[in-house]
Image (spheres, grey):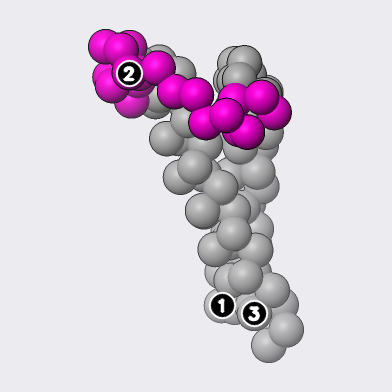
Amino acid sequence: MTIMVKNILTVVYIIVCVALIILATVQAKDSQGASGAITGSTTNNFYEKNKGRTKEGALKKATIFLGILFAIGSVGLSFLYLM
């Protein structure tokens, strides 16, 4: 039973990893760079306020969600394989 659970979780983990790689490469790069981080320049316009509703915002949310799943899966699988 535990071997089947390990195999299923490993396959799910691999799918999460591949999806995370694809989403990270599809996303557009933020153009602020180091100067934006130093000066903290943010524009307060309609697009910035509603950025989460755009395609880029959805990709960012999905990437964050998959990153959290990746971290939880890493810890979970390490505990499973240590037992």
Q: Is residue 1 above or below residue 57?
A: below
Outermost residue, bottom side: 83
Q: CA distance from mark 3 to mark 1?
A: 16 Å
Residue carrying label 2: 44
Quadrant housing the C terminus = bottom right
Pair 2/1: label in front: 2
Query: Residue 75 — which label?
Result: none
* Residue 22 visible at all: no
Are the two marked residues, 3 and 2, in contact with CB atoms closer than 8 angstroms?
A: no
* Residue 16 visible at all: yes
Pair 3/1: label in front: 3
Residue drawn at point x = 54 percent, y = 63 percent: 72
Residue carrying label 1: 1
Q: Is residue 11 magenta?
A: no
The percent position of residue 45, horizontal first and vertical second, equals 30, 12
Q: Quadrant of residue 19?
A: top right
What segment is highlighted magenta in the picture?
34-52
The residue type indicated by label 3 comes to: Phe
Q: Main secondary structure of the magenta part?
A: helix
Q: Is residue 25 above or below residue 70?
A: above
Left or right for 67, reference 54? right
The percent position of residue 31, horizontal first and vertical second, equals 62, 16
The residue type indicated by label 2 comes to: Asn
Q: CA distance from mark 3 to mark 2?
A: 45 Å
The percent position of residue 16, horizontal first and vertical second, equals 58, 44
Residue drawn at point x = 56 percent, y = 77 percent: 1
Mark 3 or mark 2, earlier in chain: 2
Q: Quadrant of residue 74?
A: bottom right
Left or right for 74, reference 59? right
Q: Is residue 45 magenta?
A: yes
